[in-house]
Amino acid sequence: MFTAELPSQQIMYSALLEKNPAFEGIFFFAVKTTGIFCRPTCTAKKPKAENVEYFSSTKEALSHGYRACKICRPMELPGQTPSWLKILLKEINDQPDLRLKDQDLRTRNIDPARIRRWFKQHHGMTFQAYLRALRINKAFGRIQHNHTVTDAAFASGDDSLSGFSEAFKNTTGFSPSESKNNIVVSVTRILSPLGPLFAGATEQGICLLEFTDRRMLETQIKILKNRLKAAFIPGENRHLIALGKQLKEYFSGKRTAFDIPLVLPGTPFQHKVWQALQEIPFGETRSYQEQAIAIGNPKAVRAVATANGDNRIAIVIPCHRVIGKDGSLTGYGGGLWRKQHLLDLEQASLKSPKRSGVASPQS
């Protein structure tokens, strides 16, 4: 694990006072008077500035004799699934057609209100809506693979074809019989040291990867829905599983390139810019001017910057490697501190004997 350069103490103290999620993974703070260290978003009473010490990693905080806060749990990844929910989610992943009522949850020692709050906070929907979406996603896949609508309905546990059709249309925006002519984007959260990422994939490849707190996330989803004529539904597919594995390798310093098919609806100019981004060597940076030259259009600096901002697949298409002409960090949808962290990580990975290169992905 590398040690990133920390922001100024003034910036970090302001971040912990504001509980700013953009600084998750950037620093941890410890309170000298209590001997406890926390993540920036901790909800505990905030200490005085003179009583705070800052660290770039939990290992560093522990080595200085501090113990982890029981409220914000800094030893867990930001957004990590709580232990009380992990067993249930594994059961659901193994049986996506599973139906669970409140009493079924209570027999598993889970408070229905508690799980409802967790899913609203992390997925923007209730637990029952999440289960229903998983069943619809699975049914869509069955119909795509030549099962009849009736077979898909009963396989998902519905004893009413009309009820199934209504739920399917409410979730996807189209009827089950129209599935052959439509696309579903399976979406999931992927945890990272810099906070949770929202990922989406069709059967053809990854089409979305953004930090969940990015302000433009809803806009990007809307654009993809329109361009792909697709419905976004919680679920997994082989591309999302591969992406999660490769991101884990990337953040641990063991991967320098991604090998995942990408789905990139956009203009010919955007495709040129996004391809040029993928050609920036790992651990290096380029200016917008250099990117404009790379696509054969030196005067298109502003257009290149705009196309960079329109990139919907963070990290894999490394727009974080583009900086200002004077070497300064410039706009990044995930936040400048994340951008700095990614650049520092790549520099550290180049010095690590454990890294492994993989061919650049095809777009």
Image: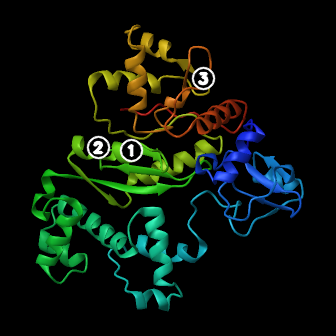
The reply to whether residue 97 is in sight is: yes
Q: Which amino acid, by three-letter code, is at mark 1?
A: Leu
Residue picked out by circle 1 = 208
How many C-alpha atoms fall within 10 Å of the one at disc 2: few (<14), some, or many (≥20)?
Answer: many
How many C-alpha atoms fall within 10 Å of the one at disc 1: few (<14), some, or many (≥20)?
Answer: many
Q: Earlier in the sequence, mark 1 or mark 3?
A: 1
Vertical order, 93 against 276 (above or below): below
State if disc 2 and disc 3 touch (CB < 8 Å): no
Residue picked out by circle 2 = 224
State if disc 2 and disc 1 touch (CB < 8 Å): yes
Asked whether, in this view, residue 280 is left or right of residue 338, the answer is left
Q: CA distance from mark 1 to mark 3?
A: 24 Å
State which mark lies toward you, 3 or 2. 2
Q: Which amino acid, by three-letter code, is at mark 3?
A: Glu
**Residue at 47%, 38% in the rendered image:** 314
For the N terminus, which image quadrant? top right
